[in-house]
Amino acid sequence: MHIDEETCEWLDLPSPLEMYKHHAALLEDEIAALHLQLRKARDNIRGLVQMNDELATGKAIAETALKKALADAGRLNQETSEMGRRINGLMAVVEQRDHLFRENQRLLMERNQARSS
């Protein structure tokens, strides 16, 4: 075994301790990179949570506005229906008035003709 160690030295091969140190350095670099990725992922998650909260708030506001708009639309439909019924009633009165006016005019003409004759 003593011969192998001497061979490693003159062949300029790293010793087991040097290999472990090199491997440890590689692992430290990888861990540092993973910590950076983890930090970025946490920041992204924080941003997504904040965006989700904002969207949930916006959704609640939109739902409230929709409910109000639907209530207003229902109220306006009811008012429109009532106005339509009133207009129909007024149109019937106008027809009756026009009919009575024409009848009155016809009777006046008949009376005037009867007097003239």
Image (cartoon, helix red, strand yellow):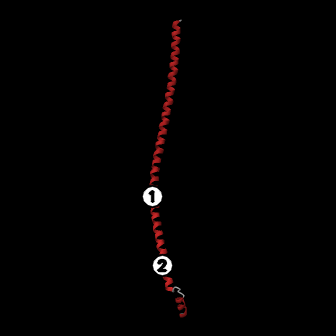
Observer-nearest of 29 and 56: 29
Tell me which label, 1 or 2, sits earlier in the chain.
Answer: 2
Image location (x, y in percent) of residue 47: 45, 61
Image location (x, y in percent) of residue 48: 47, 61
Image location (x, y in percent) of residue 25: 48, 78
Residue at horizontal 52 percent and vertical 24 percent from the top: 95
Q: Which residue matches tag 1?
A: 53
Mark 2, residues whose alpha carbon is within 10 Å: few (<14), some, or many (≥20)? few
Image location (x, y in percent) of residue 65: 45, 48
Q: Secondary structure at mark 2?
A: helix
Is 12 rendered above or below residue 38? below
Residue at horizontal 46 percent and vertical 73 percent from the top: 32
Is 75 rendered above or below residue 90? below
Residue at horizontal 49 percent and vertical 30 percent from the top: 87
Screen quadrant of the N terminus: bottom right
Mark closer to the observer (1, 2): 2
Q: Residue furthest top?
A: 117
The residue type indicated by label 2 comes to Ala
Q: CA distance from mark 1 to mark 2?
A: 42 Å
Tags 1 and 2 in contact by the CB under 8 Å rule?
no
Residue at horizontal 50 percent and vertical 29 percent from the top: 89
Observer-nearest of 47 and 57: 47
Q: Secondary structure at mark 1?
A: helix
Numbered tag placed on residue 27 in the rendering: none
Q: Which residue matches tag 2?
A: 25
Is 64 rendered above or below residue 49? above
